[in-house]
Image (tube, rainbow, N blue to C red):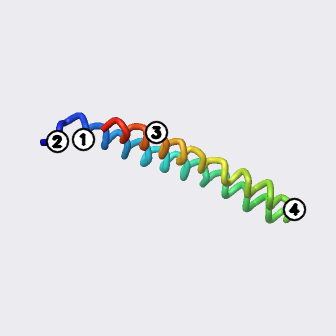
């Protein structure tokens, strides 16, 4: 029989990944639109814009790490 605690841990892991993914998407929306505008004005800004676009993805990696840590408790 499965305990309620393991179900709550799974919900917490899902929330960690889901909410971090939403936050990264929301941040990347603003950064991406600014990056496209900067590249349109000066194509030399491509590398800098690419780095700034990738930075919010680390939030999702942190959420994934938290989810793995939580699932290890089961």
Q: Secondary structure at mark 2?
A: loop
Q: Report the disc number at residue 30.
A: none
Q: Which residue is mark 3?
A: 66
Pick the quarter of the image with the N terminus.
top left
Tag in front: 2 or 1 = 2
- Give yes or no for contact between labels 2 and 1 (Cβ–Cβ under 8 Å): yes
- Give yes or no for contact between labels 3 and 2 (Cβ–Cβ under 8 Å): no
Q: Report the disc number at residue 44.
A: 4
Q: How far apart are the two marked residues, 2 and 1, measured between alpha carbons? A: 8 Å
- Give yes or no for contact between labels 3 and 1 (Cβ–Cβ under 8 Å): no
Upstream in sequence: badge 1 or badge 4: 1
Q: Quadrant of residue 33?
A: bottom right
- In the foreground, 48 or 11: 11
Pick the quarter of the image with the C terminus.
top left
Tell whether 52 sits left or right of 68. right
Circle 4 Cα neighbour tier, 10 Å, few/some/many (<14 / 14–19 / ≥20): few
Upstream in sequence: badge 2 or badge 1: 2
Q: Secondary structure at mark 1?
A: helix
Image coordinates of residue 71 in percent, x first then y, are 36, 41
Q: Which residue is mark 2?
A: 2
Q: How far apart are the two marked residues, 4 and 2, measured between alpha carbons? A: 57 Å
Upstream in sequence: badge 3 or badge 4: 4
Q: Which residue is mark 1?
A: 7
Tag in front: 1 or 4 = 1
Image coordinates of residue 32 in percent, x first then y, are 66, 57
- In the foreground, 21 or 1: 1
Q: In the figure, 49 relative to 8: above or below?
A: below
Task: Name the residue at 53% across, 47% down.
Answer: 60
- Give yes or no for contact between labels 1 and 4 (Cβ–Cβ under 8 Å): no
Upstream in sequence: badge 4 or badge 2: 2
Q: How far apart are the two marked residues, 3 and 4, measured between alpha carbons? A: 37 Å
């Amino acid at each position: 029989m499965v305990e309620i605690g393991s179900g709550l841990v799974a919900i917490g892991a899902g929330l960690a990944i889901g909410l971090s993914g939403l936050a990264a998407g929301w941040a990347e929306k603003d950064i991406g639109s600014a990056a496209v505008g900067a590249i349109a004005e000066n194509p030399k800004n491509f590398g800098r814009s690419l780095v700034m676009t990738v930075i919010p993805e680390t939030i999702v990696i942190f959420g994934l790490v938290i989810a793995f840590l939580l699932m290890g408790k089961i």
